[in-house]
């Protein structure tokens, strides 16, 4: 299932938190309120990124507005042992993802498979044929496919922390509540965008939400840390292997 469309979607989702997650180094010192008192913003952010990376599991839910007006959404529960379940959507298409540590399984709608065919250079007719064969069915994808990046916790988080140039100018903001938990806001402005990183003030300094405000806004929430990811794998007779499809 590795196609240019899925690589583009993966890149867009990877960019979802790129600005906010990358805020993990240099920053201004500001004592602010009691939360993390005396600690520099860059140190707080670094601890948050490290804690999130080490968490055994997390529920990621976000929305990204990308160029061209497309809106990409992700809602995935994933752990560090390869278990994953959730959905991704964009460009009018939606797909369910499921993984129990082995191959990634994808159940896409007709638009998903039509887009996949076209992104791979196929014609509209070929896309329609592929959609008729695969829509609504669980389709096997290799563990190292581009789609699998959505279900690789460490790789996905690392993709959000690629732009090291965003790691400067971070400042301390106010404390607020994110999903019922108190969080300290770390923020910066750059190029007409405001980047915000919300860090839990109690227990582990987990990331609770990241967001970018501007012409292409995006948000990502991080919840259910440490919660077991329940995967109900379909039977073998419900899974389609693309390698066995007839032309």
Image: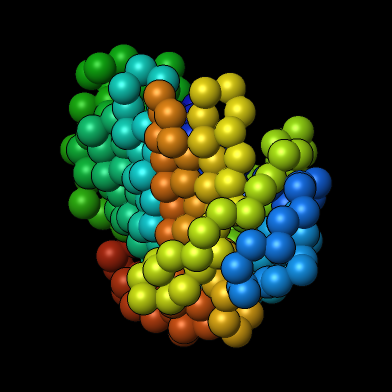
* Quadrant of the rendered image containing residue 97: bottom left
Q: Which residue is pictured at 26% across the width and 37% down the height?
A: 93
Measuring from the top left, give residue 84's x and y in whole percent.
46, 67
Q: Which residue is pictured at 71% across the width and 63% down the height?
A: 31
Front-most of residues 29 and 41: 29
Q: Is residue 25 above or below residue 188?
A: below
* Quadrant of the rendered image containing residue 229: bottom left
Front-most of residues 31 and 246: 31
Front-most of residues 19 and 243: 19
Residue 131 appearing in the image: no
Residue 230 appears left or right of 18 = left
Q: Which residue is pictured at 44% across the width and 65% down the height?
A: 176
Q: Which residue is pictured at 77% across the width and 59% down the height?
A: 40
Q: Is residue 30 above or below residue 160?
A: below
Give the mark count. Answer: 0
Measuring from the top left, give residue 123's x and y in whole percent.
31, 15
Measuring from the top left, give residue 105's x and y in whole percent.
41, 58
Measuring from the top left, give residue 15's x and y in whole percent.
55, 38
Residue 78 appears left or right of 42 = left
Q: Is residue 28 above or below residue 75?
A: above
Q: Quadrant of the C terminus?
A: top left
Residue 128 appears left or right of 169 = left
Q: Is residue 26 above or below residue 48?
A: above
């Amino acid at each position: 299932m590795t196609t240019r469309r899925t690589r583009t979607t993966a890149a867009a989702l990877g960019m979802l938190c790129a600005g906010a997650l990358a805020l993990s180094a240099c920053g201004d010192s500001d004592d602010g309120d009691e939360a993390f008192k005396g600690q520099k913003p860059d140190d707080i952010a670094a601890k948050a990124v490290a804690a999130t990376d080490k968490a055994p599991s997390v529920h990621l839910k976000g929305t990204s507005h990308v160029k061209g007006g497309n809106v990409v959404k992700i809602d995935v529960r994933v752990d560090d042992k390869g278990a994953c379940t959730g959905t991704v959507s964009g460009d009018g298409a939606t797909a369910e993802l499921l993984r129990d540590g082995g191959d990634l399984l994808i159940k896409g709608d007709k638009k998903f498979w039509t887009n996949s065919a076209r992104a791979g250079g196929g014609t509209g007719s070929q896309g329609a044929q592929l959609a008729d064969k695969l829509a609504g069915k669980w389709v096997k994808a290799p563990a190292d496919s581009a789609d699998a990046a959505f279900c690789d916790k460490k790789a996905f988080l690392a993709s959000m922390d690629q732009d090291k140039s965003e790691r400067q100018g971070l400042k301390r903001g106010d404390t607020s509540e994110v999903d019922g938990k108190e969080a300290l806001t770390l923020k910066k402005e750059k190029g007409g965008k405001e980047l915000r990183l919300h860090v839990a003030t109690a227990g582990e300094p987990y990331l609770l939400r990241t967001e970018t405000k501007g012409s292409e806004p995006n948000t990502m929430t991080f919840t259910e840390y440490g919660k077991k990811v329940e995967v109900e794998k379909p039977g073998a007779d419900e899974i389609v292997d693309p390698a066995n499809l007839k032309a």
